Image: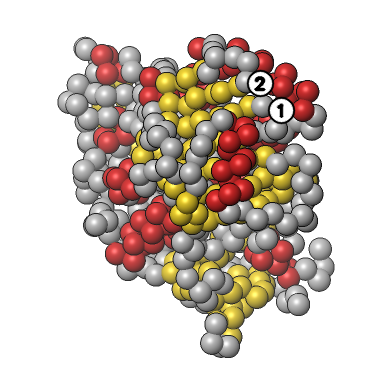
């Protein structure tokens, strides 16, 4: 590794700012102190806690979360301003839960349109209509797919950042990275659009700069891209056809896959089509006549295309970075994983990457190097398996939907309606695609806590049932830091919330009736420790047993004598 730059050598109407929503009172937990307080091991020469590179949805989430957790942050982007193209279009349920925690779910919902249904059409079978709003979504407050253009999501996040005192620095590119000899900060060399050069020392760098990430390259991390062998065309277009505005349409036939997806603007649709036989380098004219002919042949619809605002032709590929972390440099979003857009998972996975990472960076301020490293290593241990499964799953789906021969595509059109007509398959389009059932089983907290009195199934999203006061459970949790959720059976005596047994962490007591809504595997024991990202850190019969197992890794700077706070 000698000679690598990371070894010390250079190489060539929004909500109120950081208002956490009506569900969050003025409560804080471990990790919620302002930057500069309790910063064990923090280098004196670091000018900023976090340098975020890339101002897309992932980077904006990282910058907003850094500031919400009390870290100082800068966010840069080499572009001179925000793109007006829609790009990613679907925000899923788990991402809406993240946005709710951040305080931006209301504006995002207002900017979008819910998918009511998905219609699957083939030549020789009756269409299959999947009622997306009627699927068994379970405990989430966001039981839907939300169609919202990426630029709208970015505008909401950037406005939220600005209202909280932050700002995107447009026209600023990362040139190089170098970790200092003491390992306490990262030196980033920046190039401004006016020709100025700047060197900034950051405690951490988070690369959210996309598939051609300069952060990834400068830190020596590798992403091997595999060509999926399929060329797609995409366009956002108005129509004169009378299609049901809030329903998506899939057409499977020998000519290739066609998707027509609703957008929030009335009569505007996203058209996505596989074009078999077209080479990656071949030029296509994606104008209204081209789109009308393609839709006429595959769907039998006189579409009347006009007002084409964005069109793109792309060759699908997929890949996963070898590591998510090198020292004080982390990757998130498309910088760490690239994949087919099937299922609309990319933006959502990136936002959830950033949400997972930033609370850990904030908590690591309070820890010595060993415990901080263990906590920060859990970011890769948790998020890389999620991305690996997503990349593999979308690659398989893409291969099935873009099979090379017309005969096989015809066969797919015969089999797919049968499969999609089955309730268990349809149910996967709810919680599964909505990313509500993602768990962290291969690293971090899911490996800890098998001692006496400790439940081993940690690392699961905490269910979010409606409680007897009409609020949902997530609304009762601390805005920042950890929360205890405890089952209080009649006649049982638990220590009050300010007892030192709770280690200064807020406590939510639930009744027997309320507890029945907690069906997740990590919530069966009577004491559950919930992380800032609403995943379970541990569960057991007593607070002491949970802290003994989960505390050293998940709460590296906790003080057992800190005053507590009762929120039940």
Residue pictured at 61% horizontal, 21% vertical:
122
Residue pictured at 58% horizontal, 45% vertical:
291
Give the distance between the C-alpha atoms of the residues marked 1 and 2, in whole angstroms. Answer: 8 Å
**Residue pointed to by mark 1:** 254
Q: Nearer the viewer, mark 1 or mark 2?
A: 1
What x and y, as percent, mark residue 350?
Answer: 54, 48
Q: Looking at the image, which is closer to me, 235 or 160?
A: 235
Q: Secondary structure at mark 2?
A: helix
Please state, as top left, top right, bottom left or bottom right, where the C terminus lies in the image. top left
Q: Looking at the image, which is closer to me, 286 or 432?
A: 286
Q: What residue occupies the far bottom of the structure in this picture?
A: 195
In the picture, measured across the screen, residue 87 lies left or right of residue 135, that is right
Residue pictured at 36% horizontal, 39% vertical:
113
- Judge the density around disc 1: few (<14), some (14-19), many (≥20) Cα neighbours within 10 Å: many
Q: Looking at the image, which is closer to me, 163 or 228?
A: 228
Residue pictured at 55% horizontal, 51% vertical:
288
What x and y, as percent, mark residue 230?
Answer: 74, 42
Q: Is residue 418 visible?
A: yes
Q: Secondary structure at mark 1?
A: loop
Q: Is residue 358 visible?
A: no
The label on residue 413 is 2
- Asked if residue 488 is positioned above or below residue 27 in the image, the reply reads above
- Judge the density around disc 2: few (<14), some (14-19), many (≥20) Cα neighbours within 10 Å: many
What x and y, as percent, mark residue 452?
Answer: 51, 20
What x and y, as percent, mark residue 220?
Answer: 74, 62
Q: Looking at the image, which is closer to me, 297 or 153?
A: 297
Circles 1 and 2: CB atoms closer than 8 Å: yes
Sequence-earlier tag: 1 or 2: 1
How is the rendered protein coloured? secondary structure
Please state, as top left, top right, bottom left or bottom right, where the N terminus lies in the image. bottom right
């Amino acid at each position: 590794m000698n000679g690598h730059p990371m070894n010390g050598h250079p190489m060539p109407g929004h909500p109120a700012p950081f208002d956490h929503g009506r569900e969050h009172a003025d409560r804080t937990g471990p990790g919620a102190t302002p930057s500069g307080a309790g910063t064990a091991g923090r280098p004196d020469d670091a000018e900023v806690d976090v340098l975020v590179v890339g101002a897309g949805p992932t980077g904006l989430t990282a910058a907003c979360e850094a500031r919400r957790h009390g870290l100082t942050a800068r966010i840069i982007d080499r572009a001179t301003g925000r793109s007006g193209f829609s790009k990613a279009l679907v925000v899923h349920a788990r991402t809406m839960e993240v946005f709710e925690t951040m305080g931006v779910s209301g504006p995002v919902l207002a900017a979008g349109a819910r998918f009511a249904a998905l219609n699957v059409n083939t030549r020789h079978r009756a269409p299959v209509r999947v009622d997306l709003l009627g699927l068994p979504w379970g405990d989430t407050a966001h039981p839907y797919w939300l169609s919202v253009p990426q630029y709208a999501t970015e505008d909401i996040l950037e406005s939220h950042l600005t209202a909280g005192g932050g700002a995107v620095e447009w026209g600023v590119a990362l040139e190089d990275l170098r970790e200092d000899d003491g390992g306490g900060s990262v030196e980033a060399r920046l190039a401004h659009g006016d020709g100025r050069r700047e060197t900034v020392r950051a405690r951490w760098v988070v690369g959210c700069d996309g598939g051609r990430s300069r952060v990834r390259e400068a830190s020596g991390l590798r992403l091997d891209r595999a060509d999926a062998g399929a060329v797609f065309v995409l366009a956002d277009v108005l129509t004169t056809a009378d299609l049901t505005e809030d329903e998506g349409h899939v057409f499977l036939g020998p000519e290739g896959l066609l998707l027509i997806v609703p957008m929030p603007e009335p009569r505007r649709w996203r058209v996505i089509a596989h074009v078999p036989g077209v080479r990656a380098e071949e030029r296509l004219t994606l104008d209204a006549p081209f789109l009308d002919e393609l839709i006429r042949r595959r769907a039998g619809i006189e579409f009347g295309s006009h007002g084409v605002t964005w069109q793109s032709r792309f060759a699908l590929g997929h890949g996963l970075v070898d590591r998510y972390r090198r020292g004080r440099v982390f990757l998130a979003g498309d910088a760490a994983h690239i994949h087919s857009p099937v299922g609309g998972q990319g933006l959502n996975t990136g936002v959830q990457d950033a949400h997972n990472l930033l609370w850990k960076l904030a908590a690591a301020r309070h820890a010595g190097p060993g415990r901080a490293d263990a906590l920060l290593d859990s970011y890769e241990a948790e998020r890389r398996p999620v991305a690996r499964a997503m990349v593999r799953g979308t690659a398989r789906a893409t291969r099935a939907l873009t099979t090379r021969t017309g005969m096989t595509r015809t066969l797919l059109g015969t089999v797919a309606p049968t499969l999609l007509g089955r309730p268990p398959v349809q149910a996967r389009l709810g919680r599964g695609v909505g990313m509500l059932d993602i768990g962290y089983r291969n690293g971090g907290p899911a490996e800890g806590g098998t001692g006496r009195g400790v439940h081993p199934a940690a690392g699961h999203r905490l269910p979010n049932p409606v409680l007897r006061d009409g609020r949902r459970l997530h609304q009762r949790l601390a805005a920042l830091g950890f929360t205890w959720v405890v089952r209080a059976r009649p006649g049982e005596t638990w220590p009050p919330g300010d007892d030192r047994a709770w280690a200064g962490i807020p406590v939510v007591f639930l009744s027997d009736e309320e507890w029945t809504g907690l069906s997740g595997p990590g919530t069966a024991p009577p004491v559950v420790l919930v992380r800032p990202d609403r995943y379970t850190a541990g569960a057991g019969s007593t607070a002491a047993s949970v802290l003994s197992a989960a505390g050293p890794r998940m709460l590296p700077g906790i003080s057992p004598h800190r005053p507590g706070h009762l929120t039940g």
